Image (cartoon, grey):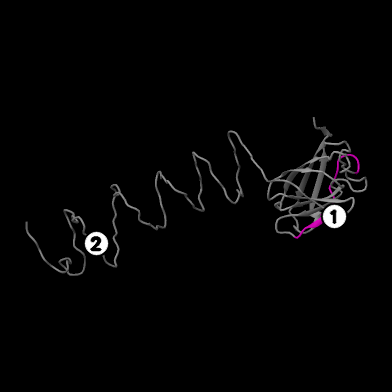
Amino acid sequence: MSEIRVNKLIDEAGTGSVELTQGATLPSGKTISGAGTIAVNSSGTAAGLSGTPDITIRNLVGAAATFTGVLTYEDVTNIDSVGVITARSGINVTGGNTTVKGAVETVNTGAYATGAISGVTTGILTLDTATGTVFTHDLQSGAVGLVSITNFPASANSFHTVTLLLNQNSAGTANTTAVLGIGTQMTLTPTGVAGFSTAALVGSGTTVLLSTTAEDIDIVSFGIHYNGGTNTTATNYKTFVTKNGDFRLG
């Protein structure tokens, strides 16, 4: 075996690099170092990468990839997952169509209305849609008149639905008055808006009242339509309210 000991290799003209016509072998334990770069153009297969290095690249193009940890990425065109996709901050669909196949299961353990008595006969129910759109509330004392719906998106040409299940108390006295009625006095507070007072539209009649029978359950539905105008102007919103019959427990 022959050896050539030199400090530098350049081409015959003295201006360029040399060509390793038969390739080159790097002995085990040896490395290539320096401040330059390695540029390779090849149509062959890529060498394997092993170990646990941190690799930073600009673009990754391939037919398939397998990741065993948590994958975080932005600005992708398509997501095809065989498992469960968890969206920690919600899902925002800004265009196209949304198709859901298979069973859809929704579990919500914390969406309860909070009641705060503001007067002798007028109660305030706050429905925070950041926690859900279906609320339950047990009526123990006092009348319920003012309903506050908060944190719903002010999206143009949208119709946001909120459902409220109200369980009458054992005496049947937690009822809206004829003057007030559910939806007659409301406060709407969309996301990013300070809020304003309004009244909901009803079908037939002038008020939506609760049952006066003990332990009855009333299901009251609110629908909020925003026409896309100035989101702080109450007249750009229409709220509708309707109620089913009075269900009896037991």
Along the viewing direction, whichever of 73 and 210 lies nearer the viewer: 210
Whether residue 111 sits left or right of residue 214 in the image: it is: left
Write the residue at 78% across / 44% down. Answer: 222
Q: Residue furthest left?
A: 1
Secondary structure beneath dot 1 equals: loop
Count the numbered circles shown: 2
Is label 2 in a helix, a strand or a loop? loop
Residues 81 and 143: in front is: 143
Q: Amino acid at mark 2?
A: Ile
**Callout 1: few (<14), some (14-19), or many (20+) C-alpha neighbours within 10 Å?**
few
Residue at the (53%, 44%) spot, across then down: 85
Which mark identifies residue 118? 1
Please say whether residue 78 is one of the residues in the magenta stretch: no
Amino acid type at mark 1: Ser
Lower sequence index among marks 1 and 2: 2
In the image, residue 173 lies at what x, y percent?
89, 42
Q: Please tell me which residue lies in front, 81 or 93.
A: 81
Specify start and end residues of the magenta stretch as a single range: 194-206
* Mark 1 or 2: the one toward you: 1
> Would you name the residue on which mark 2 appears?
32
Q: Quadrant of residue 34?
A: bottom left
Q: Residue at x 26, y 64 (%)?
A: 33
The CA span between labels 1 and 2 is 77 Å
What is the quadrant of the C terminus in the image? top right
Image spot of residue 64 (x, y percent): 40, 43
- Where residue 63 appears, as percent x and y from the top left, is 40, 44
Q: Position of residue 41 (x, y in %)?
A: 29, 54
